[in-house]
Image (cartoon, grey):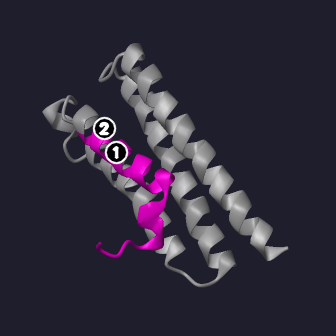
Amino acid sequence: MEYLYSFEKLDVWKDARAYVKKIYEITALFPDKEKFGLSSQLQRAAISVPSNIAEGLSRHSDKEQIRFIEIAYGSLMETYCQLCIALDLCYIKVELMNEIKIEIDKIANKLNALNRAIKKRLT
């Protein structure tokens, strides 16, 4: 069996990777004029979520791990804001927004649970 890094075992990291794929599928529907605007910004923010989970859990300090999990959460909220803007600009439909919001909520809850678990180790 191949070795897995600790973050690879986490459902939240797996969910965040699937979320990145979904964001790429959504931004493919945006107008070409957004290729270097909202599409790119949204993709970078989405990629930041699993990337910061991975980087954070590779740190030995609980405080550093918490910091990176909080950054991942912030990036997730950034994507939500950008999706709201995409909705305002009629790049996505309400139904798609509602669907992706369920994924955002799921990842946010798991990030919060992970954050609480790490903080508990500090006490």
Left or right: residue 11 compared with residue 18: right
Q: Label 2: state its secondary structure.
A: helix
Which residues make up the magenta segment? 1-24
Badge 2: few (under 14), some or many (20 or more) residues near its Cα, within 10 Å? some
Amino acid type of the residue that numbered disc 1 sits on in the rendered structure: Ala
At 40% from the left edge and 52% from the top edge, which residue is drawn?
Answer: 14
Residue contact at pointers 1 and 2, CB within 8 angstroms? yes
**Quadrant assignment for the N terminus:** bottom left
Residue 6 or residue 104, whichever sits in front: 6
At 23% from the left edge and 35% from the top edge, which residue is drawn?
Answer: 25
Above or below, comparing residue 27 to residue 75 in the picture:
above
Quickly name the residue at label 2.
Answer: 22
Above or below, comparing residue 58 to residue 33 in the picture:
below
Residue 6 or residue 84, whichever sits in front: 6
**Quadrant assignment for the C terminus:** bottom right
Residue 34 image position (x, y, % from top left): 22, 38
Q: Report the magenta stretch's main SS.
A: helix
Above or below, comparing residue 15 to residue 58 in the picture:
above
Q: Nearer the viewer, mark 1 or mark 2?
A: 1
Amino acid type of the residue that numbered disc 2 sits on in the rendered structure: Lys
Residue 51's label in the rendered image is none
Quickly name the residue at label 1.
Answer: 18
Residue 73 image position (x, y, % from top left): 56, 53
